[in-house]
Image (tube, rainbow, N blue to C red):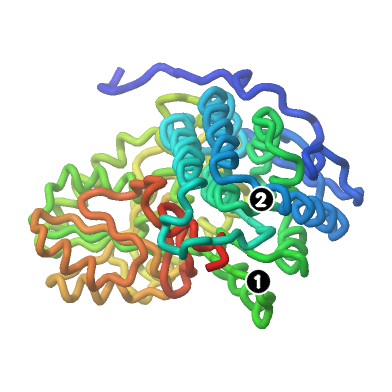
């Protein structure tokens, strides 16, 4: 047995609780059947096993949900902030109590490793509800006027990479500020949103304050274009974000978009190599690279390129790919067949354009959607793998000589969501951060999140901020 071989340590699938064979929508505090007959299926990406069928939301379903949210808005927005905060505190505590159940369900439906859902996603979900519960009775001190008012009914469309966390990012500030919501989860990962509906009932949340309508992009389009919606919040692809912006142009609806990214992780010659390598690995292989702010472009100073690459390859060789419910797994399953095909297409393009591809020896399971951690060297800034968002465990490596060149290469992208800087010089960190056109800049770390800190992008990465005091603004009429 090699050093660091691990025996299987699987979490029990039974911890996820009962998964119904079919699901309807959650409207006005009740689970209801769709007005249409079409159903979609959600599968376990690690096995391709069908987990459940769920309703394809129709325009009539969206109408019902929006009407329920509109009706509930009058009484919910009239509640004192302290009373609204009590509901959010209650939701946060229930999430903590049911965290094991939710973590296992998220891993089954999404494909990400249990140690990530258990140790990252669920603690952050609860933290966001706790944080915004605290703001609910302090809105006059948030800096948005002495009497900030809620916007109204919010349409919220979330992606599949962090299903429950993205739900928390959107629902918590909306409820704290007195808004009601209609949320559409991604069509490949609806299960934790539907379980959250149960939590809303368990917490005694008034009917209609939170409504969940499932379905694919057709349902999302009907929701975001609905005439009775006051605010749209979307996290997802830049392409869909553009379509929503075109639909809302000329209306009075508020819009915030958190879209794609192609973040640069910049390593200088004075950086602690082992620490930087851990940040590189966390930046691109966390959640199988299904992260909008993933550090998918590695910029390494020429003088330490070989040293960093050798250390990176050694570290990649220790990553464990496999069963998402195994507590020793580092990289789980790709979320869907469609996403796997997208990753395969772009990596094939990288090879065709002349980049050098490397992956560690890795035995992938025979069933499910899998992709080995991959790094490309000899990458040009014109290569597709350096310009397009792959949204998978694929890293492109470029080099630079001077800080000015690093900034130019880092900013040479249509995106602007995040960046990372690795150096011992504090003055260099501050100078780089002021020059990088990115909404979030991490120094000597990567992919660190906190509910008190705002998150959002520039350029094609969207506009608006989520998290922190800044996250309140999108849901206040100021």
Question: Relative to 198, is 245 above or below?
Answer: below
The answer to whether residue 301 shows anywhere in this view is yes
* Residue 455, picture quadrant: bottom left
298 sits left or right of 343 in the view: left
Is label 2 or label 1 in front?
2
Residue 253, label in figure: 1
Q: 313 or 146: which is nearer to us?
A: 146
Extreme-bottom residue of the structure? 250
Q: Which residue is drawn at the image coordinates 13% and 56% (left, top)? A: 423
Question: Relative to 186, is 9 above or below?
Answer: above
Q: Which residue is drawn at the image coordinates 25% and 22% (left, top)? A: 3
**Secondary structure at numbered mark 1:** loop
**Secondary structure at numbered mark 2:** helix
Q: Which residue is drawn at the image coordinates 12% and 72% (left, top)? A: 402
Question: Relative to 428, is 172 above or below?
Answer: above
User: Are the residues tagged 2 and 1 within 8 Å (C-beta)?
Assistant: no
Question: Relative to 116, is 353 above or below?
Answer: below
Q: Which residue is drawn at the image coordinates 45% and 38% (left, top)? A: 127
22 sits left or right of 375 in the view: right
The image shows residue 365 at horizontal and vertical percentages of 53, 33
* Residue 238, picture quadrant: bottom right
The image shows residue 290 at horizontal and vertical percentages of 48, 50
**Of callouts 2 and 1, the N-terminal one:** 2
The image shows residue 393 at horizontal and vertical percentages of 42, 50
Q: 245 or 464: which is nearer to us?
A: 464
The image shows residue 119 at horizontal and vertical percentages of 41, 31
422 sits left or right of 288 in the view: left
Residue located beneath label 2 in the image: 78
Estimate the spatial distance between the alpha carbons at disc 2 and disc 1, rounded to whole Å: 22 Å
Quadrant for the N terminus, please: top left
Q: 129 or 121: which is nearer to us?
A: 129
The answer to whether residue 297 shows anywhere in this view is no
């Amino acid at each position: 047995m090699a050093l660091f071989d691990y025996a299987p340590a699987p979490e029990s699938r039974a911890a996820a609780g009962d998964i119904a064979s079919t699901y309807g929508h959650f409207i006005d505090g009740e689970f209801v059947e769709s007005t249409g007959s079409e159903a979609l299926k959600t599968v376990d990406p690690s096995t391709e096993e069908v987990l459940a069928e769920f309703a394809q939301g129709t325009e009539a379903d969206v109408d019902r949900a929006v009407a329920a949210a509109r009706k509930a808005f009058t009484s919910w927005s009239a509640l004192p902030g302290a009373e609204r905060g009590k509901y959010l505190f209650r939701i946060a505590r229930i999430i903590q109590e049911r965290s094991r159940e939710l973590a296992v369900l998220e891993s089954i439906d999404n494909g990400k490793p249990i140690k990530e859902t258990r140790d990252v996603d669920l603690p952050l979900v609860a933290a966001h509800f706790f944080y915004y519960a605290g703001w609910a009775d302090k809105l006059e001190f948030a800096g948005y006027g002495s009497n900030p008012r809620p916007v109204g009914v919010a349409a919220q469309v979330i992606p599949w990479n962090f299903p429950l966390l993205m739900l928390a990012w959107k629902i918590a500030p909306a409820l704290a500020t007195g808004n009601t919501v209609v949320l559409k989860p991604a069509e490949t990962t609806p299960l934790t949103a539907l379980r959250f509906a149960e939590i809303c009932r368990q917490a005694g949340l008034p009917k209609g304050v939170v409504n969940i309508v499932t379905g694919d992009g057709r349902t999302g389009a009907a929701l975001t274009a609905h005439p009775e919606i006051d605010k749209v919040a979307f996290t997802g692809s830049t392409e869909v974000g553009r379509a929503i912006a075109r639909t809302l142009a000329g209306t009075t609806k508020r819009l915030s978009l958190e879209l794609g990214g192609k973040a640069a992780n910049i390593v200088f010659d004075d950086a602690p190599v082992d620490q930087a390598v851990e940040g590189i690995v966390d930046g691109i292989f966390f959640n199988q690279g299904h992260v909008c702010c993933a550090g998918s472009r590695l910029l390494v100073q020429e003088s330490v390129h070989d040293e960093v690459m050798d250390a990176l390859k050694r570290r990649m060789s220790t990553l464990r790919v496999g069963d998402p419910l195994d507590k020793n797994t580092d990289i789980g399953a790709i979320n869907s067949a469609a996403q796997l095909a997208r990753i395969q297409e772009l990596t094939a393009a990288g090879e065709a354009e002349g980049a050098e591809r490397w992956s560690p020896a890795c035995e992938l399971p025979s069933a499910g959607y899998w992709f080995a951690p991959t790094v490309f060297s000899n990458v040009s800034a014109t290569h597709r793998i350096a310009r397009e968002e792959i949204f998978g465990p694929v890293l492109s490596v470029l080099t630079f000589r001077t800080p000015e060149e690093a900034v130019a290469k880092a900013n040479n992208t249509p995106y602007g969501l995040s960046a990372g800087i690795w150096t011992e010089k504090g003055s260099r960190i501050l100078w780089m951060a002021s020059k990088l056109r990115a909404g979030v800049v991490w120094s000597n770390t990567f992919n660190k999140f906190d509910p008190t800190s705002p998150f959002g992008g520039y350029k094609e990465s969207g506009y608006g901020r989520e998290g922190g005091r800044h996250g309140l603004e999108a849901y206040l009429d100021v």
